[in-house]
Amino acid sequence: MNVYDSGKIAACLVRLGYQQTGMLEIADLVIVNTCTIRAKAEQKAFSFLGRLARLKTKKPGLIIGVGGCVAQQEGEKILRRVPQVDLVFGTQAIERLSLLIPKIEDKRCRIVDVGLMEKPDLPDAVPDRLIDDPVSAFVTIMRGCDNFCTYCVVPHVRGREASRHPDRIIKEIGDLVQSGVKEVTLLGQNVNSYGKKEGLCSFANLLSRVNSIDGLLRIRFTTSHPKDFGSDVIKAFKTYEKVCDHIHLPVQSGSDRILDRMNRKYTRALYLDKISELRDNCSAIAITSDIIVGFPGETEADFAETLDLINTIQFDGLFAFVYSDRPNAPAVHFKNKISEDEKRKRLQAVLALQENVTRMKNQALVGSVQPILVEGVSQKQSSGRCKRPLTTAQWTGRTPTNKIVNFYHTDSRQRRADIFPGKIVRTRIEEAYAHSLWGEPVGLKSTTGGLKGEESYAA
Ligand code: 5AD
Ligand code: SF4
C-alpha cells in the first residue's frame, strides 16, 4: 500500500516541477513514506530520518517530509524529535500535498496535517501516479480497516474502512494495461469485505469485472481475512482464468485462546475448513500466511498449537513476526508479556519448521513446466554482480503460485524478441532453492543449457 501511495506522492511532486533522483545527496526535497505496523518498521523510519537530518546540516535548503503511518501516529511529536523535518502529513493528506509543499517552499514554515476523518471522502478520481514496475502494478481498492485486531495499529492510523467505486478501479486498471502492465495486485486491508459497507458490488464481482479486461494477464489480491473469506471468492480461483493460484491468508496463531484474545473472530477449525475448501476447489493453489509469535499470554501449549497448525497445513511460505506493542492497540495493556528472548526462540522455531516445508514444496515442482511472467533481468544481473558474459541475460519472473523463477537466455540479436518483461515464458523447473527456483525455458531455441547452478541462488 505504501508503494502505491509513494507512486501518488511522486506524481504530485513531478506535477510541482520536481524530478526524481536516485542520489539522496543531490535531492532538494525528500519524502519518507513510513510504516508503523511493527516496532521495527518505525525504528527504521526514525533512523533514516536521522540520516536526513545530518544531510540537512550540510545542505540547509533541503526540505524533509514525513508521510504515512508513523506521521499519522506521531503527528507533531516528529517535529520535536527531528527538528530538521519540515512537513508531517498523515495517511489521508496525500491529496493535499500539492498545496502543502508550495507553502513550505514559499514561507519556509513547518506544517503538520494529520486529520483522520471518520468517513473519509475518498478522492475517487483515477489517481495520477508514477510506477517503477512496467509489468506488475498495485491497485488500491479500499482503505482503512474496521476489524480492530488487538495487536494492530492499522485501524488507528489508516482510519475506517472505505471502498473505491468499481468503475474507477476498472478504469485505473484499463489505463495501466494500456501502458503495458500485465499483472495487477488488488490491495486492501481486508479485500473480502470490499464494497459491503457502501453497497457496491462484492469482491467476487469485482474480480469478475477485472478478469474481463483485455490485455491483462494476471490478477492477484491481498490481504484476505479468514472470517470474511467466502465460497464466492474461493470459486473465483477456478472460474476466472486470470486469478492466480495463490492466496495470502493470515492465520496469526494456531491457538483458539490466542485467536480470541487477538479478536480475530475465527477459530482454528474454521481456518482449516477454509484451507480444505480452497484445496478441494483448486488443487494447485499456493497458500501463504502471517504468524505472530509471543502475543501477550501465549503459553508453550498455545505456541505448540501454532507449530502443529503450520505442520498440518504445509504453507508454501510464511511471514513470521515477533509481537511488538503498538500505540493505541489494546494488547499494549494485556498482561503476561513474553520476554524478548522467548519471542526470538519461538520465531526461530517457526522459521526452521517452515524452511523445511518450503524446500519440500519447491522441490516437488522440479520437472514441472510452469508459465513464468517475466519481470526483468534478475537483481544479480542488474547490479552487475552476475559473472555471465553480457550476451547471456539472467531473467526473473514468477509462477502463478507466486514463486520466483530465474533462468538464462542468450540475448543474441536474432533472439532478442524471444524474452522481454511482460511475456509469459513456459519454463521447466530444474532446481529448487530455499526462496527461488531455477528454470529452463522450453520451446525457445536460444537457451543456454548447462549454465544453471554455477552460482548459488538460494537466499
Ligand atoms: N506485532 C507483530 N506483528 C504484527 N503484525 C501486525 N501487527 C503486529 C504487531 N503488533 C503482523 C501481522 C499482520 C502483518 C502485516 O503484520 O501478522 O498480518
Ligand atoms: Fe490490522 Fe486486523 Fe485490520 Fe489486518 S484485519 S489491518 S491485522 S486490524
Image (tube, rainbow, N blue to C red):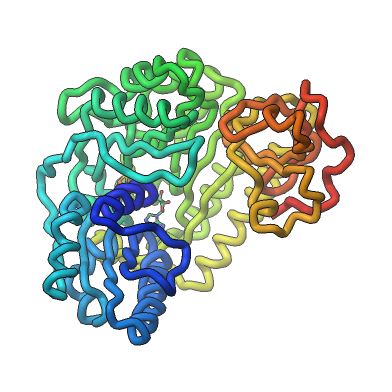
In which image quadrant can residue 387 be found? Answer: bottom right
Q: Is residue 398 visible?
A: no
In the figure, 4 relative to 71: above or below?
A: above
- Left or right: residue 276 versus residue 19 is right
Task: Please give the name of the residue rendered at 52% of the width and 26% of the height, measured from the top-left corner.
Answer: 244
- Left or right: residue 133 versus residue 105 is right
Task: Please give the name of the residue rendered at 29% of the width and 25% of the height, measured from the top-left corner.
Answer: 171
- Left or right: residue 253 versus residue 414 is left
- Residue 442, x across and y down, in percent: 77, 24
> Where does the C terminus fall, quadrant-wise?
bottom right
- Residue 66, x across and y down, in percent: 28, 66
Q: Residue furthest bottom?
A: 57
- Left or right: residue 363 versus residue 154 is right
In which image quadrant can residue 420 be found? Answer: top right
Q: Residue furthest right?
A: 450
In the figure, 417 relative to 280: above or below?
A: below
Q: How many marks?
A: 0
Q: Is residue 443 visible?
A: yes
In which image quadrant can residue 437 be found? Answer: top right
Image quarter for ligand 1? bottom left
- Residue 81, x across and y down, in percent: 26, 81
Return the residue nearer the eye: 445 or 362.
445
Return the residue nearer the eye: 46 or 360.
46
Task: Please give the name of the residue rendered at 66% of the width and 43% of the height, measured from the top-left corner.
Answer: 358
Task: Please give the name of the residue rendered at 25% of the width and 42% of the height, measured from the top-left corner.
Answer: 143
- Residue 87, x across and y down, in percent: 21, 68
